[in-house]
Amino acid sequence: MRKLLIILVIGCITAGAALAQTARPGDAGLGDPYFPLLGNGGYDVQHYTIDLTADVEDNTVLATVTIDAVATQALSAFNLDFLGFFVADVTVNGKRVVYERDGREMTLFLKEPLDEGEAFTTTVTYFGVPGEGVADPYDVFGLGWANYGDGVFVASEPAGAARWFPANDHPLDKATFTFRITVPEEYVVAANGLLRETRAARGGMMTYVWETEYPMATYLATVNIGDFVRQEDEGPDGLPIRNYFPAQLAQRGTRVFENQPRMLALFSDLFGPYPFEAYGAVVVDTPLGFALETQTLSLFGREVLSVFSFGRDPQSVIAHELAHQWFGNSVSPASWQDIWLNEGFATYAQALWIEHERGAEALADYMRGLYAYISSPALQDPRIAAPGSPPPEALFNPSVYQRGGWTLHALRLRVGDEAFFEILPTYYQRFAYGNATTEDFIAVAEEVSGEDLDEFFRAWLYETEVPPVPEMGLPPVIEDEELEQAG
Ligand code: ARG
Ligand code: ZN
């Protein structure tokens, strides 16, 4: 009897040890060919809670980030992407863990391994000046959390999220977010999703609680702190629109952004229903020189409120960032090499807005101008010409945008309007709230059109030389009545 018990006990110990042995560290990356260290393997984040107090004057933050995740393998250790700051405390399931930092990788060593499929909670408490002392090999723009003196914005595409919070920093791992941001009471905070609560905090501070209903890629998370005025509007089907403008520029802002509901109606009609719980723009009181499609709340610099932002009509960039909510945010690139699936689509959406507003001739003129541009020596530079394989250090080069956009127009001329306007919503709906590759898009285009398009896409996306324009007449206008029926 006693012998049997001993054997049983030993058996259990060995079985336990055997189980534990299968636990191994999660990978330091998610296999992105352009940025192998972006994201981490072995777990899937469900939710981030970012509890953060910001001192705008000193440009410091104090934060606790809580990450709810599920292990996708038995884990003995795992990584977070995180750069800079002083780390005060790291826990997993409420217990302090040993960790190590090396560049953008932070490795957490688990005393008790996690089983595959096990849900677990990690917290990281940290403070400091965002970006201070940070040397990041993947730094394309050096942004992330940016303090411009009178306020803060956050713009992180492609790799800046890890510069302000610990994350699984790759669009393959989307999660929902809660932001609890505490600021001196003279400021207003605008972040992604819906504002759930504002409450007074100690010492003349205010806490703004924002929450996203839908999963979001880490680079699309944004927090904006400024003297904003909130302006409300309504999109199709009662979609809440909330815009945040600098107090002094609010009237101008209201006018410049007044077309958003009509743009929403057009794109919902062409691509599929708007994917998220709300939309709006935040305009920060500093010149940015770019805009970013931060989910549900696109980010613009104050130049968008001058007559010619970026040397062109601000309506174009407003349409562009809105279109990214479908292409980029709901359907996200599976790897950063696929960035033309974001920028080419958003650029062509600008053309669709022009066509809708000003007709087929205006579209043809616009596309002719772009064709001349993409055919210029500067854009046929072999280093950047092919939009399907941009250099990692020049992901956002003009060929990705303009030739990427022209690729869609060429597809439309090649397969005809009927097939083209079925390809867009079919692709969108198939990959909504997920990720897609260029191959996925080509497969949908071939399936819907019934044509073999490998050679067509190879020439447009992967060759230096710009292909000739497919032979077709001028495309017809999208009628307003059709839109109203759909809206
Ligand atoms: N996705 C952005 C756009 O809509 C581009 C962001 C480029 N970032 C930058 N810091 N310039 O075009
Ligand atoms: Zn864009």
Image (tube, rainbow, N blue to C red):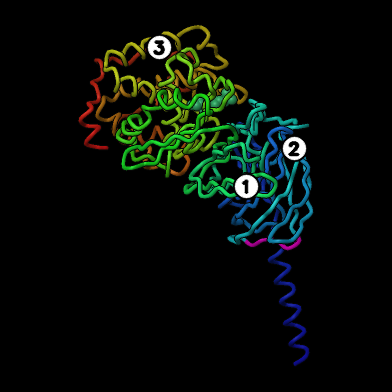
Whole-percent x and y of residue 276?
Answer: 42, 43
Magenta stretch, overall SS: strand
Q: Earlier in the sequence, mark 1 or mark 3?
A: 1
**What's the mark number on residue 84?**
2
**What's the mark number on residue 371?**
3
Tell me if residue 408 is in the magenta stretch: no
Q: CA distance from mark 1 to mark 3?
A: 45 Å
**What's the mark number on residue 50?**
1
Whole-percent x and y of residue 66?
Answer: 64, 52
Q: Quadrant of residue 314?
A: top left
Circle 2: is it few (<14), some (14-19), or many (20+) Cα within 10 Å? many
Residue 464 visible in rendering: yes
Q: Which residue corresponds to the image point at 70% horizontal and 41% vertical from the top-left?
A: 82
Q: Earlier in the sequence, mark 3 or mark 2?
A: 2
Mark 3 secondary-structure assignment: helix
Looking at the picture, does residue 118 appear above or below residue 470?
below
Q: Earlier in the sequence, mark 1 or mark 2?
A: 1
Whole-percent x and y of residue 93?
Answer: 68, 61
* Magenta residue span: 111-115
Looking at the picture, does residue 174 appear above or below residue 160?
below
Instruction: Give the number of the mark in front: 3 or 2.
Output: 2
Q: Quadrant of residue 390?
A: top right
Looking at the picture, does residue 164 appear above or below residue 384?
below
Q: Which residue corresponds to the image point at 37% horizontal and 41% vertical from the top-left?
A: 239
Circle 3: is it few (<14), some (14-19), or many (20+) Cα within 10 Å? some
Mark 2 secondary-structure assignment: loop
**Mark 1 CB near ligand 1 (8 Å cut):** no
**What's the mark number on residue 363?**
none
Whole-percent x and y of residue 180?
Answer: 60, 47
The three-letter code of the residue at mark 2 reads: Gly
Residue 344 visible in rendering: no
